[in-house]
Image (spheres, rainbow, N blue to C red):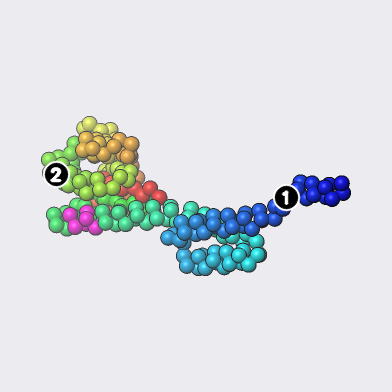
Amino acid sequence: MKRRRYSNHDEEHIDESWLIPYSDLLTLLLALFIVLFASGSINNDKLQQIMISMNSALKGQGSSMILKENSGITKELEKSKPQTNKQAETEKLQSLMGQIENYINERGLNKVITIQDEPKGIKLSLKDVILYESGSAELKGDSLSILTDLLDLIKQVENPISIEGHTDNVPITGGRFKSNWELSSARALTVLYFFEEKGIPSNKLQFSGFGEQKPIFPNDTLEHRQANRRVDITILKTE
């Protein structure tokens, strides 16, 4: 009876020690797959650290170091994705800027159109003489072909577009508009409507009129006042 009871007791307590190495093996396999997936976007130093941790785990030092490194991989991936998007956008905008500069030079428009890279985006500045008659917000004939050409280039990107109207400080007397505020806003809005008619989505467009409040130069000479009367078209950065 004693021998039979002893045998039954052994049968009730099955040896489960094999589960420990099995679970460690699964952890190592998971870590390996994560390493293979992330190896294209992390640096060699990070890979070396991960390999050291895996080697330590294989020697029986546990899997905590691997889990720590896996957490580092996740953070590395999270950082690299936005950075890649931002870099791609920067390259597209720089390419667009180069094409617009070539267009301006080829057409001899340097005196009436300038372009510059600013923190908020690429800004095209067009003097009012190329777009409107004095005191008017209606686009004149020659300006339509120029705006169309520029727009064909701008359509290469899908970034939002900001349109700003500016005037000099000479007060408006008579005519359709009561102030420089109204004139600058109407001119920016006219360009916005033109872009919208040419296929730019409405939700990508915005406009504002600043009147005489943001001059490039002091309004002390005829040339400076002419430079201050302008429409700025900015292809905005999204990142």
- Horizontal and vertical percent position of residue 155: 24, 45
Identify which residue, 221 or 96, lies in the foreground: 96
Residue 100, magenta (yes or no): yes
Q: Which residue is mark 2?
A: 145
Q: Which mark is residue 23?
A: none
**Which residue does the image show at 26% across and 56% down from the upper left?**
95
Q: Mark 1 falls on what kind of element?
A: loop
Residue matched to label 1: 14
Looking at the image, which residue is at 59% across and 60% down? 66
* Residue 80, picture quadrant: bottom left
Residue drawn 12% across the image and 40% down it: 141
Q: Nearer the viewer, residue 233 or 128?
A: 233
Q: Amino acid at mark 1?
A: Ile
Q: Amino acid at mark 2?
A: Ser
Q: Quadrant of residue 231?
A: top left
Marks 2, 1: nearer the viewer: 1
Residue 205, image x, y percentages: 31, 39
